[in-house]
Amino acid sequence: MAEEIDVRTLAALTETEEPFILDVRRPEEYVEAHVPGARLVPLDELPARLQELPSERPLVVICASGGRSLQAADWLAAHGREAVSVAGGTRAWAEVGLPVHRGSGCCSG
């Protein structure tokens, strides 16, 4: 099973590194609210879009509450990629008062 990190760890990572934040929710969920800088690649599109993910940056996978992101991180690990899942997902991120972006923004798939 993939490693999980909490939202405060992700927030700290964004200040010291440039993790690739992979949001695996559906487009309508992403538009509603997403972590700043997150790139949308819906879970069901992940196999076809694996080549779009950078290999030189840490992959941090997020969804609404942590279930799909854990599934995606496990799938990525099985395909030779290092990835961690964000426990609690975007909901936990917003609940602790961290900023969210709304709309498709710059990073939608």
Image (cartoon, rainbow, N blue to C red):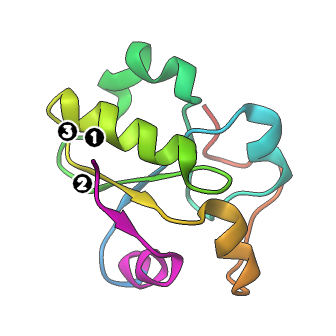
Closer mark to the observer between disc 3 and disc 1: 3
Position of residue 37 in the picture relative to residue 72 (left or right): right
At label 1, which amino acid type do we have?
Pro
Residue located beneath label 2 in the image: 57
- Label 3 or label 1, whichever comes before in sequence order: 1
Q: Under tag 3, what secondary structure? A: loop
Classify residue 24 by image quadrant.
top right
Give the residues drawn in magenta, as a range: 1-14
Q: What kind of residue is marked 3?
A: Arg
Indicate the position of residue 96 as horizontal and vertical percent values: 69, 86
Does the image show residue 15?
yes
Question: Residue flagged by tag 2: what amino acid is it?
Answer: Arg
Residue 13 highlighted magenta (yes or no): yes
Image x and y of residue 106, in percent:
65, 47
Say few, some or many: other residues with alpha carbon within 10 Å of mark 3 (under 14 / 14 to 19 / 20 or more): some
Residue 41: x and y, percent?
54, 32
In the rendered structure, find residue 54 and report the number of the disc placed on it.
1
Label number found at residue 81: 3
Q: Is residue 40 above or below residue 59?
A: above
Instruction: Determine whether the residue tagged by mark 2 lies in a helix, strand or loop.
Output: loop
Q: Is residue 80 above or below residue 89?
A: above
Image point 65% across, 39% down: which residue? Answer: 25
Mark whose residue sits in front, 3 or 2: 3
Query: In the image, is 103 to the left or to the right of 67?
Result: right
Q: Residue at x 82, y 57 (%)?
A: 102
